[in-house]
Image (cartoon, helix red, strand yellow):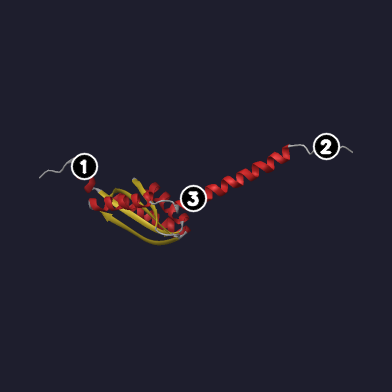
Amino acid sequence: MELTKNEVKSLAKALGMIETRGLIGSVEAADAMLKAADVRLVKQEKADAALVTIYVEGDVGAVQAAVESGREAAARVGELIASHVIPHPDDGIKKLLQTEESKTSAKPSGNPAKGEAREKAAGKKATGNQQAVKEQEEPPPESGA
């Protein structure tokens, strides 16, 4: 059985992950990983208010080198939580990452009723501000004395 070019290409791939506490450590880790080896930044994911995971992909050796550099960089400036390399990940992993990404991007941004209330309040503030500006522009009435 002969493999297609895409199958051979996917067999050479690996997925690297670094999880940090805080954004600065994750940015430093991503920078170090991208500079250390020929890898592609897949995405950044915020698990909660503090945990951030950086995902990279590339050839197995490149991803291993990148994750090692990223670990060191994250530990220097922040708090490294975990790191891992998955050589030759199954296609389901890629689908899992895409599914998680689409869930977070499809999530509505808050309660629509609250958004409408905020817009109305902003409109009232603007009207009040416009009135104040208008009053400042008009000269005071002259007194007849």
* Number of residues whose C-alpha sits closer than 10 Å to that of mark 3, classed few (under 14), some (14–19) or many (20 or more): few
Pointer 3 with pointer 2, Cβ within 8 A: no
Image location (x, y in percent) of residue 106: 37, 49
Horizontal placement of 107 versus 144: left or right? left
* Number of residues whose C-alpha sits closer than 10 Å to that of mark 1, classed few (under 14), some (14–19) or many (20 or more): few
Which numbered tag is attached to residue 121? Answer: none
Q: What amino acid does circle 1 point to?
A: Asn
Image location (x, y in percent) of residue 104: 37, 52
Q: Mark 3 and mark 1: span between their CA atoms?
A: 46 Å
Task: Please identify, in this view, whether the residue under mark 3 or under mark 1 is nearer the observer.
Answer: 3
At 34% from the left and 46% from the top, the residue drawn is 40
* Residue 89 visible in this rendered orientation of the protein: no
Q: Earlier in the sequence, mark 1 or mark 2?
A: 1
- Determine which residue is flagged by label 2: 142
Q: Name the one closer to the observer, 43 or 107.
A: 107
Which numbered tag is attached to residue 115? Answer: 3
At 15% from the left and 43% from the top, the residue drawn is 3
Q: What amino acid does circle 3 point to?
A: Gly
